[in-house]
Structures are given as structure tokens and as C-alpha cells.
Image (spheres, rainbow, N blue to C red):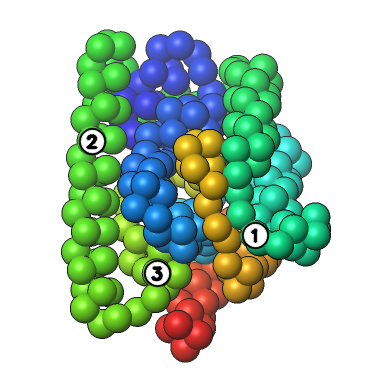
Amino acid sequence: MEGASSIAKRMHLSELLIGFTIVAFGTSMPELVVNIISNIDGYNDVVFGNIIGSNIFNTFAILGISGLIYPITVQQNTIWKEIPFSFGITLIFFVLVNDIMFFGSETNETGRIDGFILILLFSVFMYYLFRYLRKDFHNSDEGIKEFSNTKSISFIVLGIILLGAGGQLVVYNAVKIAHYFQVSEKLIGLTAISAGTSLPELATSVIAAFKKRPDIAIGNVIGSNIFNITLVLGITSLMHPVAYDSILNIDINVLLGGTLLLFVFMFTLTVKKLDRWEAALLSVLFIAYMIYLFIRK
């Protein structure tokens, strides 16, 4: 967080851009590692459960907790462009995995063509970020410590390594416990693994909330959601086709609903801000979703 803010200040870049790129990319690394390993080992439900579960965790739990700590002010561009882009990406994801429903195929899966489409969408998003969010004249440098580029990058790299290692440690032990209780791969992916791989996002956004850096908090969450679907699933699908179980459509709808609810919250209570009451509702909805998952199994 300190390293990313310092880079933003030294290069006169928007903290929102840093949140959407460096921070979001770094915190999405555990999802990428887990998905590559799961794809190689043939754990298809873990691949999709990890992505969908992580994005649900980001949207409901992380924004909920961060907003309870400090209300998150959201910029105009994020409300009208990045949040709708995240919603649109999720809709495209829904179409791509439901081959039987939309294309009359015999099976549901994401193949190399789907992977190419997702990577292309990732490239479009990155172009948009650096084209339109490079400068942010509403960004405040007050209270940001400025370090050398080497030190700032070292902070970022070290933070990613430590957060990623911590996330993987949680995942490893969670999977062992889940296997011991003989629960499904879907439940493992949607709960233990997705929560474990989302620990970097949680730590980063919570720290950003404590330091009153809302742009990094919101950028990290929305950016990670987009990265998980476009980059993580894109790379995974390019490696090897991944079979999809349509029961997960329910969970994708939960994610779509959460993204839409976040958009609506920008126009309720305090405009352009995720207030504490709204953050509390996101947290309660996440708990309700977790209860539902364990009932559904």
C-alpha cells in the first residue's frame, strides 16, 4: 500500500489507476497460481469456484468490511465506467461458460477461443486505464510518504510475496480440512479457497480504508474482479479447456446482483459513496450467502 501510493505520488499517477493495476494485479496472483495448479490437476470445479467465490468475497465481504471501517468515496469514472465494465465482463463470462444454453453445444466449458476473448477484453481494459485514468487531478498527496522508486517497488514486491504466501498457507490447510469432511470441490472453491486467495485483497483494502485511501480500496476490488475473470480465467482456458457445471450459474447471478447493488448504492444515502449502512448490508448479504452455500453443499 505505501509503495503503491508512493509510486502514484512520484509519477503523478492517479491512486485509482494504481489500485486498478499494480495493486489489483498483485493481489490476484494467488487466484492465478491456484487456478493453474487446479487446471493441471483437473479440478475444474475449483477453477470456477475460486474465480466466482473470490469475486463474491471481494464485492460483498471486502467492500463491506472496508466500508464499515471508513466510508468509501467513489469517483465519477468508477461509477459510470469501471463498475459497469465489471458487470459487463461478468455477463460475458456467464455467456461463455453456458455453451449448452446459448450455443446448443453438448457440454459447457471454456476453451482456447474463450480464453483468447477474455485476454482480449483484459487488454481493452488495460488500454482504457492507461488512456483515461493516468492523471487524476482530484488525487490528494497529503500524508503520503514518498520513497525512492527502488524502495517503493521493493515494498510492493515484498507485500505481494508475503500476502500471497499467507494466502496459499490458508488455502493449503483449508483444503486439507475440507477433504477431511468430504465436501464438494465446488464448496471448497467457493469458500475456503476463494477466501484464502482473496486475503491479499482483504488486507490491502482494509489497510487502504484505515489510511483513508478510498481509490486504492475500490480500485483493488473492482480491478481484481475484472482481472480474475479476464486474465486468470483467460490464461487458464488457454492452457486447457475447463468443464463448467451449470449449478454455478446461481453463484454468477449472486455476483451480478452484488455488482448491480454496488452501482445502486452510489445513488442512495450519500451520493458517490459507499456508506457504513450500505457496507453493513453487503456484509450481512455475504453471511447469508455463506449459509446458503453450506445448506446447498
Say whether disc 1 or disc 2 marks the residue closer to the N-terminus. Answer: 1
Q: Nearer the viewer, mark 2 or mark 3?
A: 3
Residue most toward the bottom? 295
Q: Residues within 10 Å of mark 2 (few under 14, many from 20)?
A: some
What type is the residue that disc 1 sits on? Answer: Asn
Residue 233, relative to residue 263: is it above or below? above
Residue occupying the point 30% across, 11% down: 149
Q: Which residue was labeled with disc 3?
A: 185
Q: Position of residue 16 (x, y in %)?
A: 54, 31
> Is there any visible trace of residue 278 in the rendered image?
no
* Circle 2: residue type: Ile
Between 290 and 237, the one lying in front of the other is: 237
Residue lying at 21% horizontally and 59% vertically, measured from the top left: 172
Q: Position of residue 202 (x, y in %)?
A: 37, 52
Q: Which residue is mark 2?
A: 161
Within 10 Å of disc 3 (Cα), the crowding (few <14, some 14-19, many 20+) is many
Quadrant the N terminus occupies: top left
Q: Which residue is mark 1?
A: 108
Chain-order first, disc 1 or disc 3 = 1
- Amino acid type, callout 3: Glu
